[in-house]
Image (cartoon, coloured by chain):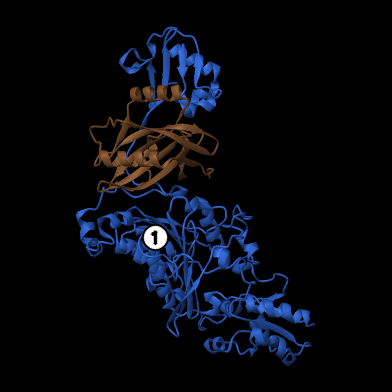
Amino acid sequence: MKIAIPTPLRPYAGKNATVEVHGANVADALQALVALHPELRKHLFNDEGKLRAFINIYVNDEDIRYLKQEDTAVAEGDTLSIIPSIAGGSAGSAAVGAAGAQAGGAKPAGLSKEEVLRYSRHLIMPEVAMEGQLKLKAARVLCIGAGGLGSPLALYLAAAGVGTLGLVDFDVVDYTNLQRQIIHTTTDVGRPKLDSAAEKLHAINPFVEIQKFETALSSANALDIFKNFDIIADGTDNFPTRYLVNDACVMSGKPNVYASIFRFEGQASVFATKDGPCYRCLYPEPPPPGLVPSCAEGGVLGILPGLLGVVQATEVIKLILGSGEPLVGRLLLVDSLAMRFRELKLRKNPECPVCGKHPTVTKLIDYEQFCGIRGEESAMPSQSPEMQVEELKQRLDAGEDIFVLDVREPHEYQICNIKGHLIPLGDLPRRVSELDSSRDIVAHCRSGKRSAEAVEFLQKAGFTKVRNLAGGILAWADRVDPTMPKY
Amino acid sequence: MGRKTMLKISPANYELMRRHGEKTYPDECCGVLLGKAAEDLREVLVVVEAGNSRTDSAHNRYNILPAELIKIQRMAREQGHDIVGFYHSHPDHPARWSATDFAEAHWIGCSYVITSVAGGRADRTAAFALNGATEEDKRFDDEEIRVEG
């Protein structure tokens, strides 16, 4: 007799569609089958040796359940079919997110009465209407970062009724965030940003399913996290992650709704659509490390991420609705001081290493290395000799002759200082003559990063008695003088 | 992470599958995709509509009777095709797999195509590959649908 093997089990049955066996009844025939192809056993039977519940066995056109089960007699010329069941349906909870995140409870089909009321100003617009609102509800948007851009972005997407919002962030709320990251409040300081953000989003719209990814986005996890989302919105503040998000979007075929901000200016675009350019078409290479300061270094007008985050949210909604003219192939430049919005045309670069005709980057790479840095923390050249704040304090108190060099900017000096001699890092080369190489010099900045560069520069210039104040004036405020303000 | 697979289907077959969901709305439709399966590519050559035997809860459940499947499987064999996947609709529900879809998917190596039918009109269609080695480690991976030919 013949046993018909279903497609999924063929790899375990020598790739055969049918297998010839002998046996008096179904049980015998199945045992003969697994004797021939032992790998099939675990696919057909559970640990107790019983046929798995979802496996149906038919003899010719009859279900053995309605015959004598596995005792059903078989004869030469019969065909025994193994049929795993085919069933499912939208009932039950919504899709399970990546990384095993469990989705929320069952979602009603269509919109509930409460949702209709909530979204009524959308529903009465023919451009959105019920069809569009259901699209929003079905949409899954991943926000990278719950900070300056991510705050307005996620708040508005939740309010608009985007069904599933993913948030990636691993930071905790800090006092310096509150000037712009409006999803977090003063009482949230010290809490994980994801917890704080999820709470606000749920308060605005309990119908939204929030998926939290409390992790640093990396080459190892990006594709896995992206896979359960339709649109990725990049609200990151650093180049390695920006290139990572872009490349992962190109590779997984998902649009990258991008914005970035610096001081008074911002830019936004939609990258990595099917025919549009990607971030690498615009910027094939990252800027040299240190050239473009981060918000922590260069500062940012607190309102600006609000402006740009809302541009991102608008583009996300348009992509979901499939209406309007998306910011594809256009780079929007916003100058908040002049309050001018300009636009640059972007073209897809056929030579682009990621989205071009012959891509050379086909899997995610080491983006820290690509951007020439090893993350902000470890960016300090470790070879520069350091001094701890406690040691400096002790030696200054003891009246030792130590020359304290402050390499920050004048406006930072105004916020707080330890009476060091101020030479901003950028001025150091032409003002090096102000320094006496025979004296002990301790250089400091805010966090120890710029002063490490200063120490390196001075060493190359022949200074031998120069050290970097580890942790900068922040460490001083933490460990020596708690009355000193931090910024 | 699973390798990315692709489902190739002609515009006519693609429409057939989507319209089936409009016809049965507000109930779920279901059917079988026959064709050729290669390593990373499944090509749909025939779309076979099947009956939904879940008359008790057809708006959010589907089931294809094994007896019907045996007939379809036989037909496939005669045409020299394999079963490469299944499709069903989600009336007024997103085109993504539900916990029920996952729990009741057993054809590892096949494509599961879901069309969201919003208010009677086919909206998004998405495909998921059921990957893994056994029932215990199976998973759904997003699959690209290429409509061409």
Secondary structure of the residue carrying tag 1 is helix
Task: Label the blue chain with its letter.
Answer: A
> Is residue A373 left or right of B79 when viewed as pictured?
right
Residue lying at 74% horizontally and 82% vertically, measured from the top left: A458
What's the colour of chain B in the image? Answer: brown
Residue A366 placement (x, y as % from top left):
63, 58
Per the image, the residue denoted by label 1 is A319
- Chain for mark 1? A
Q: Nearer the viewer, residue B21 or A294?
A: B21
- For the point 77% across and 79% down, the residue is A460
Res A400 visible = no
| Above or below, comparing residue B23 to residue A287 in the picture | above
Please identify the quarter of the rendering in which residue A388 is found: bottom right
Horizontal and vertical percent for residue A264?
48, 81
Residue drawn at x 20%, y 60% is A117
Q: Is A367 placed above or below A415 here?
A: above
